[in-house]
Image: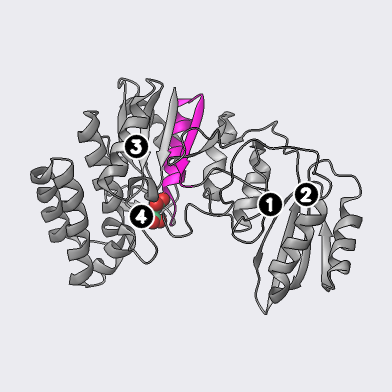
Amino acid sequence: MIVCKFGGSSVADAELIRLVAKITQKSNDRRFVVVSAPGKRFAGDDKITDLLIQAHQGSARALEKVRARFLAIAEQLHMEEEIARELETIARRIFLSADYAASRGEYLSARILARLIDAPFVDAKDILCFDASGTLDFRRTYERTRAALKPLARAILPGFYGSLPDGSIRTFPRGGSDITGALVAGAMGAQCYENWTDVDGVFTADPRLVEGVRPIEQISYRQMRLLSSMGASVLHPDSIRPVFRAGIPIQLRNTFREDCPGTRIWADAHARLPLITGKPLESGMCVVAILHAEAPGLLENARASLDHAGIDCASHSVFADHLLFFLKAREFVRAVRALHETLVELPGDSRTCSSPSGTLSAENPDAH
Ligand code: ASP
């Protein structure tokens, strides 16, 4: 049995929701499907979650945009009446709490997909339990998830939220639908957690910065967590733990390129190439991280590469499976390019990769 999660860019309009329905129905193993709220359809578009937060803060214009967007989807999928009723309820309750408002995009996405494929809708508020302090109660969450889902051949669930002991809605941090998917996979002992997004998976560096990046077929949970904490937004860092504990592999897949195998994340995975990433720090500095493959003399080669490019490195740290370099933030892109050329492109000329390109750091940075 497979648990799938589809990100915001995969459910951004009616045509895409139809595509998600098709992918889901292609395999009976894809029993439990978690969805995000509709994300951006094009640069400069709004994410539904952002609009809902603005609506809660008093913007009537944002609420109207949410209404118009969902009504357009509902019309194309022939479910106007039901969705119009849901939208009225949401409009009446939008000031109930910020978490309630923010969660309604996922709620409506899941309602729409469930109706489209005629599968049961299971509300996350009934199975994902937080304690009074707002910490997730794993034991109760797993018990309730199993009780609700075991009897069902298929179910559609909203990501991103659960409930507090008093029944009110509580959301995860932004991008938290990934965590919902991981919890459902962990509770149900899935054979795989498929995380469908808008990129082909993980690459040796961010293709928006570096030409000639190579796809990574597999990576360990630990490396993925490190990458996520370094700013690669392809997967929420808190979604690793539930699947890691249960030994469930995560398969990153691209909704827009179903033929692409993506990246597999599992315990014994072994990336064959070094991965280069990083993020800005405070006070004009940045950190560049190199996650190892078995590259002899990696530290020496990396230092030589930065020297050769005339980049001053303030300090570096060596860990068992990664290196960190601290540099001026304005040198970030040059450093990543120089390191990628030295550590990946030159030594890897003989290594061929079959998968096509995409980006390390997106579910387009704003599509969640
Ligand atoms: N819709 C939420 C967000 O925009 C959660 C998610 O997409 O995972 O952050």
Tell me which numbered mark, 2 or 3, is placed earlier along the sequence: 3
Task: Say if the magenta span includes residue 257.
Answer: no
> Of the residues shown, which amino acid type is indicated by label 3?
Val
Query: Do the CB atoms of the residues marked 4 and 1 lie less than 8 Å apart?
Result: no
Tell me which segment is drawn in magenta.
174-198
Q: Can you identify the residue that label 2 sits on?
A: 344
Tell me which numbered mark, 1 or 2, is placed earlier along the sequence: 1
Q: Is residue 90 above or below residue 30?
A: below
Disc 4 on helix, strand or loop?
A: loop
Cα separation, mark 4 vs mark 3, equals 14 Å
Identify the residue at image location x=12%, y=60%: 92
Q: Can you identify the residue that label 4 sits on?
A: 39
Residue 238 appears anywhere in the view = yes
Disc 1 on helix, strand or loop?
A: loop
Q: Can you identify the residue that label 3 sits on?
A: 20
Mark 1: few/some/many CA within 10 Å (<14, 14-19, 20+): some
> Of the residues shown, which amino acid type is indicated by label 1?
Gly
Disc 2 on helix, strand or loop?
A: helix
Cα separation, mark 4 vs mark 1, equals 29 Å
Camera-side residue: 288 or 122? 288
Foreground mark, 2 or 3? 2
Mark 2: few/some/many CA within 10 Å (<14, 14-19, 20+): many
Q: Can you identify the residue that label 1 sits on?
A: 212
> Of the residues shown, which amino acid type is indicated by label 2?
Val
The colouring scheme, among rainbow, by chain, secondary structure or one colour, is one colour
Tell me which numbered mark, 4 or 3, is placed earlier along the sequence: 3
